[in-house]
């Protein structure tokens, strides 16, 4: 009960904070609208959590892997440029589908968070797109612009090299 | 270089990257390769735009709003790219997972 | 002419190849053109806002990005299941 109340208060504060940041205005009408919208947001969050839909509990290490994304974006942009140059020179594209063995886990919130984060981390850089995670065959299907090794972020989230 | 020249250079980079990606979206023959050209606009081209806004307006409301738009587009683009790739596979094969007829590296043996 | 207006014109020109993509190929290929246009329009609103010195267009940038997300996702789901 106490934990839920703290979580609701925290999400209310975050939502109101984003609103204040966005409007950058200390005027009372803006603040009132922000509070009303944040209350609606908190109610929506509570309903979604109560229904058991998309329960998500990431570990701090998994979230902090987002710090590596700029590096992968730079590498991905380079690979995409190479692919573009090959296309202009009428050379064969190296793009392919790749099935990566992956510890898919179960229906628990941690496994769900792991699957969501690996999908996001591998889809944000321009050189790879996750098509899906096959829980029956324990593999992650991705399309990559050129053959490459499994990134560290994916390995730390359950992919096997 | 003055601020205006920097802004000009940064915006030229934004437009150039966007134009190349848009032309690639319209001309590249392989659908899945084309899909990759969605990402550079939000991940690469948005950074010079953000820097140009900060140079022009300072670290005020405009910069905060641009950062929020950048964050939103980054996540939105990743979700849309993933959903579109999956939809394309489902339309092509009837399911998105590895097909036994396909020769995909790393795929576990089927049936 | 200020650089922001030039960038706005450049980004508006980027919508032409997106339009070409929307009018060609299979439905899923057309969707790609629509998704790209959504991102470009968001960026256009930012540069146009700076060009006109009117910060209200920033809200349009965020709104158009979020609406492009909704639209793109609905189209992707429809194309996957029913169309």
Image (spheres, helix red, strand yellow):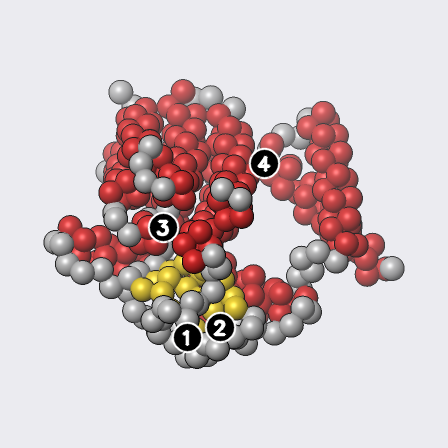
Identify the residue under disc 2. A139
Marks 4 and 2, Cα distance to the nearest angstrom? 40 Å
Mark 4 or mark 1, whichever is nearer to me: 1
Q: Are marks 3 and 2 in contact (CB under 8 Å)?
A: no
Residue A24 is situated, as x and y percent measured from the top left of the image, at 60, 33
Q: Disc 3 is attached to a residue of which chain?
A: B
Marks 4 and 3, Cα distance to the nearest angstrom? 31 Å
Location of the N terminus of chain A by quadrant is bottom right
User: Few, some or many C-alpha atoms within 10 Å of disc 4 (few <14, some 14-19, many ≥20)?
Assistant: some
B42 on left or right of C70:
left
C4 on left or right of A133:
left
Identify the residue under disc 1. B107
Marks 4 and 1, Cα distance to the nearest angstrom? 46 Å
Q: Nearer the viewer, residue B8 or A72?
A: A72
A21 on left or right of B23:
right
As helix, strand or loop, the secondary structure at mark 3 comes to helix
Mark 4 or mark 2, whichever is nearer to me: 2
Q: Disc 2 is attached to a residue of which chain?
A: A
Numbered label attached to residue B35: 3
């Amino acid at each position: 009960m106490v934990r839920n109340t703290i979580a609701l208060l925290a999400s209310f504060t975050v939502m109101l904070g984003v609103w204040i940041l966005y409007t950058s205005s200390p005027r009372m009408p803006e603040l009132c609208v922000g509070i009303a919208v944040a209350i609606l947001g908190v109610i929506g969050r509570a309903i979604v959590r109560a229904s058991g839909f998309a329960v998500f509990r990431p570990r701090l290490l998994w979230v902090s892997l987002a710090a590596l994304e700029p590096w992968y974006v730079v590498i991905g942009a380079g690979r995409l440029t190479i692919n573009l140059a090959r296309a202009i020179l009428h050379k064969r594209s190296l793009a392919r589908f790749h099935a990566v063995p992956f510890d898919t886990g179960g229906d628990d919130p941690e496994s769900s968070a792991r699957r969501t984060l690996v999908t996001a981390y591998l889809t944000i850089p321009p050189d790879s797109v996750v098509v899906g995670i096959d829980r029956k065959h324990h593999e992650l299907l991705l399309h990559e612009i050129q053959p490459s090794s499994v990134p560290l972020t994916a390995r730390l989230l359950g992919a096997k090299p | 270089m003055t601020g205006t020249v920097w802004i000009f250079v940064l915006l030229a980079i934004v437009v150039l990257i966007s134009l190349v990606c848009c032309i690639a979206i319209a001309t590249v023959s392989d659908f899945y390769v084309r899909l990759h050209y969605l990402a550079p606009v939000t991940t690469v081209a948005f950074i010079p735009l953000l820097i140009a806004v900060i140079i022009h307006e300072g670290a005020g409301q405009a910069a905060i709003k641009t950062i929020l738009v950048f964050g939103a587009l980054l996540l939105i683009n990743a979700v849309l790219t993933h959903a579109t790739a999956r939809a394309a596979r489902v339309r092509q094969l009837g399911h998105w997972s590895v097909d036994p007829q396909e020769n995909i590296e790393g795929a576990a043996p089927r049936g | 002419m200020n650089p922001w207006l030039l960038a706005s014109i450049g980004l508006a020109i980027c919508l032409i190849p997106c339009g070409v993509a929307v009018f060609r190929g299979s439905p899923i290929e057309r969707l790609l053109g629509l998704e790209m246009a959504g991102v470009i329009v968001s960026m256009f609103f930012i540069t146009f806002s700076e060009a006109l010195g009117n910060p209200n267009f920033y809200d349009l940038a965020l709104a158009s990005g979020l609406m492009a997300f909704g639209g793109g996702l609905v189209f992707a789901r429809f194309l996957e299941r029913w169309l």
